[in-house]
Amino acid sequence: MILTPPPSPTLLIVDDDEDILSLLTLFFRKHGYTVLVAENGAAMAQALAGGMVDLVILDIMLPGEDGFSLCRSLRATSRVPVIMLTAMADHTDRVVGLEIGADDYLTKPFDARELLARVKAVLRRTGEASGRMPADARPYLSFAGWRLDVARRELRSADGTLVLLSGGEFDLLLAFVEHPQRVLTRDQLLDLARGLSHAAYDRSIDVQVSRLRHKLEDDPKNPALIRTVRNGGYVFTPVVKHQ
């Protein structure tokens, strides 16, 4: 029997710099990826509507609608992973990117090999590169009326409503769910969530926790599920059941 190799992951690179688009297109195609390009938000929307995109590499500084706005709009309807490119090393850009649901970020100028490593890491975490895991490969996890489908990377409320999570949010929630009722420091969460392990500042975890609280908690300002432990980190309080 001849096995058909899995399709190569498709990247959508959104940048108005033609030189960067050309260089990255050649680089990623050389490494086995299918590459689509867009120079602005309209072209990005057209590319996304035209077929399956496994990951978006999105520049912040774009003509017309900027990368922050595009990422925010995309995250409202899709879980496709996003790596943002910023020309500024200011942590503010990075925090804003995380707040609107980006999975990773890289500061220009960058080494294409580092971007390749980031792409591989994000695709590996989200499972978009090689397709979804079998439904019975890993369990369902339930807590406080919520149900987390680990294989499909889906979170559903008690009435079955699907709640969209970015890749980083899902990985952080999974870290909490797999270590309930235990104080986890920010460093431990960085390691467990993996995608944030390269970040050198604690605020990245705080931003992701804040986003999760707004999606999980009845009152995000007085959280009951993810509590802050002063000078300690965070603790996930619900009882977690494996199904």
Image: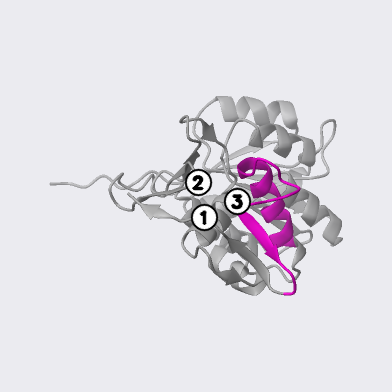
Check disc 2 and report the residue beneath it.
144
Q: Residues within 10 Å of mark 3 (few under 14, many from 20)?
A: many
Q: Looking at the image, which residue sits at the far left?
A: 1
For mark 3, give the secondary structure: helix
Q: Are marks 2 and 1 in contact (CB under 8 Å)?
A: yes
Query: In this image, 39 relative to 239: left or right?
Result: right
Q: Nearer the viewer, residue 36 or 67?
A: 67
Q: Residue at x 79, y 49 (%)?
A: 96
**Amino acid at the residue labelled 2:** Ala
Q: Residues within 10 Å of mark 1 (few under 14, many from 20)?
A: some
Q: Say above or below: 188 vs 50.
A: below
In primary-sequence order, the first of circles 2 and 3 is 2
Check disc 3 and report the residue beneath it.
169
The magenta span reads 204-231
Cα–Cα gap, marks 1 and 3: 18 Å
For mark 2, give the secondary structure: loop
* Residue 88 in sight here: no
Q: Nearer the viewer, mark 1 or mark 3?
A: 1
**Amino acid at the residue labelled 3:** Glu
In primary-sequence order, the first of circles 1 and 3 is 3
**Amino acid at the residue labelled 1:** Pro
Q: Position of residue 42 (x, y in %)?
A: 72, 26
Q: Nearer the viewer, residue 61 or 98?
A: 98
For mark 1, give the secondary structure: loop
Q: Nearer the viewer, mark 2 or mark 3?
A: 2
Q: Are marks 1 and 3 in contact (CB under 8 Å)?
A: no
Q: How is the image coloured?
A: one colour
Check disc 1 and report the residue beneath it.
238
Query: In this image, 209 relative to 107: left or right?
Result: left
